[in-house]
Image (cartoon, helix red, strand yellow):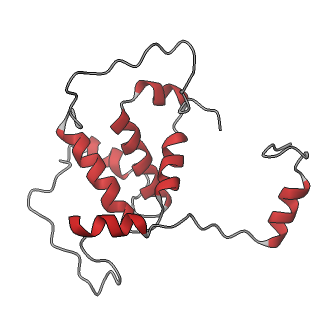
């Protein structure tokens, strides 16, 4: 795939300038975006490959104008909406209403009965969860597989 996100070796982008002693996060919100992305990944509605692919769908102008963690947030918002975990326009409505991103008081924990199989993710469990993530599973019926393969023009990976 050759898109704006695939900038390795691209001419005209200038050198990569390393910041001496660069922190992992420049702002607190960046830390929260990474934490939200990892926590939502524990819901197992998508995997790492799907998360990356979603970020790569960002329009070129927005991608180039965004920081690393702005791209992660953009992708997470789309994954949440795609999987029915975020209502369309919910973020925009809350921002327009001036709602705070953080609740005034800590939210009550999810009731286990309401969310079977969902438990709090503890730091010690992250390595095992990442190792067990597996691959994206996509259901493809025989008819769609046949029609796609019959329209290939014979070159590996190219579509008509």
Q: Quadrant of the C terminus?
A: top right
Q: Position of residue 81 (x, y in %)?
A: 45, 56
| Res 16 quadrant in image | top left
Residue 39, percent from left and from top:
30, 61
Residue 114: horizontal and vertical position, in percent? 31, 83
Q: Residue at x 15, y 66 (%)?
A: 107
Extreme residue in the left direction: 105
Q: Foreground: 36 or 11? A: 11
* Residue 15, picture quadrant: top left
Please give the name of the residue rendered at 22% of the width and 68% of the height, measured from the top-left corner: 124
Q: Is any atom of residue 122 visible in this view? A: no
**141 vs 116: above or below:** above
Q: Position of residue 145 (x, y in %)?
A: 81, 64
Q: Residue at (9%, 56%) from the top-left corner?
A: 104
> Which quadrant holds the N terminus?
top right
Q: Is residue 70 visible?
A: yes
Q: Is residue 117 left or right of residue 106?
A: right
């Amino acid at each position: 795939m050759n898109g704006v996100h695939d900038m390795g070796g691209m001419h005209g982008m200038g050198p990569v300038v390393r910041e001496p002693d660069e922190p992992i996060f420049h702002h607190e919100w960046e830390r929260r975006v990474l934490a939200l992305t990892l926590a939502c990944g524990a819901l197992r509605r998508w995997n790492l490959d799907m998360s990356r692919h979603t970020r790569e769908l960002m329009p070129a102008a927005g991608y180039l104008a965004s920081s690393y963690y702005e791209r992660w947030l953009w992708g997470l918002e789309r994954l949440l909406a795609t999987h029915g975990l975020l209502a369309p326009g919910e973020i925009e409505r809350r921002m327009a209403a001036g709602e705070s991103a953080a609740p005034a008081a800590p939210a009550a924990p999810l009731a286990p009965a309401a969310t079977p199989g969902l438990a709090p993710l503890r730091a010690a469990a992250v390595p095992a969860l990442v190792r067990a993530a597996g691959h994206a599973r996509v259901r493809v019926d025989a008819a769609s597989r046949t029609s796609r393969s019959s329209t290939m023009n014979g070159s590996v990976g190219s579509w008509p």
